[in-house]
Image: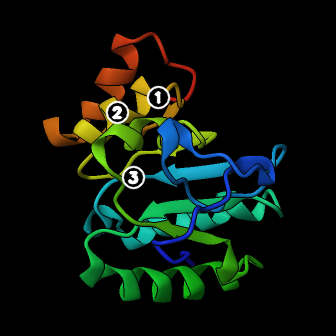
Amino acid sequence: GTADESEALRCRGGEERTPAGGRCVALPGQGEVVLANFGQMYKIQPDLLDAWCRALATNEKGVLWLLRFPESAVAGIEREFSARCSSKGVNASRLVLSTLLPAEEHIVAKGLADFALDTLPFNGHTTGADTLWAGVPLISLPGDRMCGRAGASMARGVGETAFLA
């Protein structure tokens, strides 16, 4: 879940510090994998969410970190995550949701993720660029249309091809 906006949130490793002088989300400590997608929730298709749950099942302490946006999609994502992941032995508490951060903090906060997960059929565009800028490897499956090839194109452009299909 998310924490109250008024409190400083814990960063990785339990340190009481915050990126860029602001807040960051509550994430597990070092050694635990943080898979993240910072795009709008409506881009997360059920089969893709299922694949992310399978990835979480391979690491018992990993989490999926999503942006809580748009707010109208949150209940559906929480419900789908719980239903799809529970059948794979993944507890719903491993879904971490965070709110939009101020512009001066969002790229630094994204850098706390271990891997960014791209969406299909619509890849992240600005989100993908920001994530790569933060130094986070992007895992992207190229689609059959331009809107599904942006993530792989940007990753190739900066030489980050290890996680491209």
Q: Which residue is mark 3?
A: 38
Q: Are marks 1 and 2 in contact (CB under 8 Å)?
A: yes
Task: Give the Cα separation between the discs numbered 1 and 3.
Answer: 12 Å
Q: Is residue 136 visible?
A: yes
Residue at image location 35% in from the left, 68% down from the top: 45
Farthest left residue? 146
Q: Position of residue 164 (x, y in %)?
A: 48, 29
Residue at image location 39% in from the left, 52% down from the top: 38
Side (left or right) of 138 relative to 155: right
The vertical placement of 76 against 165, above or below, is below
Residue nearest the viewer, comparing 28 with 14: 14
Q: Nearer the viewer, mark 1 or mark 3?
A: 1
Q: Position of residue 129 (x, y in %)?
A: 31, 30
Classify mark 3: helix, strand or loop. Answer: loop
Around disc 3, counting alpha carbons within 10 Å, would you say few (fewer than 14), some (14 to 19), or many (20 or more)?
A: many
Callout 3 amino acid: Phe
Side (left or right) of 9 relative to 28: left
Which callout, 2 or 3, points at the residue further toward the start of the chain? 3
Q: Which residue is mark 1?
A: 134
Q: Which mark is residue 130?
A: 2
Residue at image location 28% in from the left, 79% down from the top: 71
Side (left or right) of 140 relative to 154: right
Q: Position of residue 52 (x, y in %)?
A: 57, 60
Task: Give the Cα separation between the discs numbered 1 and 2.
Answer: 6 Å
Classify mark 1: helix, strand or loop. Answer: loop
Q: Position of residue 91 (x, y in %)?
A: 72, 81
The vertical placement of 130 against 97, above or below, is above
Q: Are marks 2 and 3 in contact (CB under 8 Å)?
A: yes
Task: Give the Cα separation between the discs numbered 2 and 3.
Answer: 9 Å
Around disc 1, counting alpha carbons within 10 Å, would you say few (fewer than 14), some (14 to 19), or many (20 or more)?
A: some
Callout 2 amino acid: Asp
